[in-house]
Amino acid sequence: MTEERGDRRIRVLVADDQQVVRSGLVLLIGMLDGIEVVGAARDGAEAVELAERLHPDVVLMDLDMPVLDGIAATAAIREKAPDRAVLVLTTYADDDSVFPALRAGARGYLTKDADDEEVERAIHRVHDGHTWLDPVVQARLVAALQPGAIPPAAPVTGPPDGLTPREAEVLVLIAQGLSNAEICDRLVVSQATVKTHINRIFAKIGATDRAQAVRYAYRNNLADGT
């Protein structure tokens, strides 16, 4: 057994209502290095129940499922365990699927034409606290953030939602695509300080990942530092 991430393998819960797809994913993921499947759910309600009972690190979530759909299941799982990563794997990449899933707290979004290497990379990335988005989904996010795509927010006096000037500055840099390391260099602060700022920003604006933070920045006219 290959041990990764220090002391144990990444525990994954698979949720998909189609038995053939579910069985195939269980088989595929079980063959990936450093990853193990701890359960498989047939619908969103079962995914929520198994996530609470089995404590997976990552939930691989389909969206179109009976009883409880994947978006509602994602929201329920993240509410019970905010640190648990949900990686959407679905057929759909339309706005009505992508944006609600990200708002519900999904940390990654893949379509089912992804190959095994991309699935493996995505699982590791979301487990490590990063965001992983299918290129089609990234393109939709970029299109949504173009001028005119999102109505501008009303002018505010100072940073919104109780953000400090420094937190607003960090949010601007996130919206400009800078990594944590690049923000450290720009502001001449430590990695720990940047992580603290980001955690506080996410808590104040209700974001769970950088994609949501970027959308917030654009909605509040912060993306260009104004």
Image (cartoon, rainbow, N blue to C red):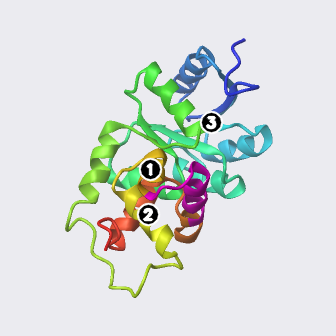
In space, the residues marked 3 and 1 are separated at their CA atoms by 46 Å
* Residue occupied by mark 1: 185
Q: Residue 162 magenta-drawn? A: no
Q: Residue 126's spot in the image, x, y percent?
A: 55, 39
Above or below, 10 relative to 75: above
Above or below, 79 relative to 16: below
Identify the image quadrant of residue 114: top left
Q: Quadrant of the N terminus?
A: top right
The residue positioned 76% from the left and 25% from the top of the image is 7
* Residue occupied by mark 2: 171
* Residue occupied by mark 3: 42
Dot 3: element: loop
Crowding around mark 3 (Cα neighbors within 10 Å: few <14, some 14 to 19, many 20+) is some
The residue positioned 68% from the left and 42% from the top of the image is 46
Q: Residue 196 magenta-drawn? A: yes
In space, the residues marked 1 and 2 are separated at their CA atoms by 15 Å
Q: Residue 195's spot in the image, x, y percent?
A: 58, 54
Q: The residue under label 2 is which amino acid type?
A: Leu
Disc nearer the start of the sequence (1/2): 2
Q: Is 69 placed left or right of 142 in the picture?
A: right
Q: Residue 222's spot in the image, x, y percent?
A: 35, 70
Q: Main secondary structure of the magenta part?
A: helix
Q: The residue under label 1 is which amino acid type?
A: Asp
Identify the image quadrant of residue 223: bottom left
Closer to the camera, 111 or 117? 117
The residue positioned 39% from the left and 36% from the top of the image is 91
Dot 1: element: helix
